[in-house]
Amino acid sequence: MSQYRTFTAADAVEYAKRFGSVDDPSALVSAEEIGDGNLNLVFKIFDRQGKSRVIVKQALPYVRCVGESWPLTLDRARIEAETLVEHYKYCPEHTVKVTHYDPALAVMVMEDLSSYRIWRGELVRGAYYPEAARQLGEYLAQTLFHTSDFCLHPHQKKAEVARFINPELCEITEDLFFNDPYMNHERNSYPVALETLAAELRDDNELKIAVAGLKHHFFAHAEALLHGDIHSGSIFVADGSLKVIDAEFGYFGPIGFDVGTALGNLLINYCALPGLLSPREAAEGRELRLNDVREVWTRFAERFTALAAAETRDVALAWPGYVNAFLQKVWADSLGYCGTELIRRTVGMSHVADMKNIRDEAMRTECIRSAITLGKRLIIAAPHIENIDALIARIRQNG
Ligand code: SR1
Ligand code: MG
């Protein structure tokens, strides 16, 4: 019976030899800990030739970026592995392959994606992957449709909701997305020059009612098995290929949360580009990002609609017109959650490289200001933005 202990690099090599499913386990000789996320240890396992062969990921019993003062359930490793396995079933092209996991050790073994790069890093340096947005839309449609009531038998759906109960990780989202930025909180941080703008978030009752509605929806609407943290740092890209990783926030929640988080991270990059690139490159990059936003939504909605037409099992949910009505609600939810992602990544705790990498302080402040303003406008206007063209017009108006 395995018992939890925190892995050293040597432990990770031994583990990969036993459970890495490589043809020649004895060839695995070394490991490097490469985790740069907020939560876990991630080991790359190398063979004698220095080629990386598999990834071993282990959850720590606390939040890595904070330390032992913030304990966190190890069950998140099971949730992550089982979410990825479930998503792989429905979208193997765009989900990392988990080959083994052990809930007691909070460890999983995954395919090595060394030929890929983290999408956020690529977006920050202005590299363009023309197929990535469409592929992300496909991933969202396949995973969210196939784990929803459109597709699962009601008994199976309820059992799945129970399997993916993830209260501690949900609580992080509930706090970081929907509470902290709208109150004074020690986890918040933003440029001093933006104090007035931050205070406006705390004092704006219309905004706070809209955010409360989004949080309530996040609490209460078990629509599909979400990834739960689908930002550009949870996505690997290569020429013509995209793979999603890091699903420890998986749970049954509102579909618009995943779609909105994905869109929000593209728009954070849109807001940051003037601080990251030359004016001409930034202008071009921003047009590409708007196109990415269009592609993610359009592909998601088209594929979800097509899947619903072909595969809906529930008799009422199959009635003509219902899937369109449902997607209208998902659209409005997505815009609201997109707005909360823009704000929590700039005012709250989890800042991202798009903004952090802007060297000029005044420029960084202006880019952050633009993200906060856009986030606020999207949250309030979400129910009135009719379609993708109207969204893109609003983003352009934000400047
Ligand atoms: C305490 S964890 C902070 C953030 O890191 C994760 O990647 C999630 O985005 C979470 O909100
Ligand atoms: Mg993550």
Image: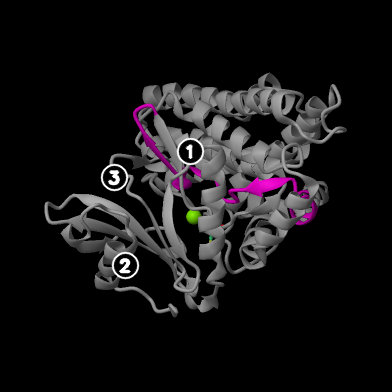
At numbered mark 1, what does the secondary structure look like: helix, strand or loop?
helix
Type of amino acid at the residue the image marks with label 3: Ser
Tell me the CA gap for discs 3 and 1: 18 Å
Q: Secondary structure at mark 3?
A: loop
Residues shaded magenta: 214-240
Residue at x-position 47% and y-position 69%: 106
> What is the x, y in percent for residue 261?
60, 43
The residue wearing badge 1 is: 92
Where residue 263 appears, as percent x and y from the top left, is 59, 36
Tell me, yes or no, whether the two marked residues, 3 and 1, touch with CB atoms within 8 Å: no
The image quadrant that residue 294 belongs to is top right
- Which residue is pictured at 46% across the width and 29% down the height? 132
Residue 215 in the figure: left or right of residue 127: right
Q: Quadrant of residue 17?
A: bottom left
Queried whether the magenta region covers residue 275, the answer comes back as no
Q: Is residue 375 visible?
A: no
Which residue is located at x 38 percent, y 26 percent?
240
Element carrying mark 2? helix
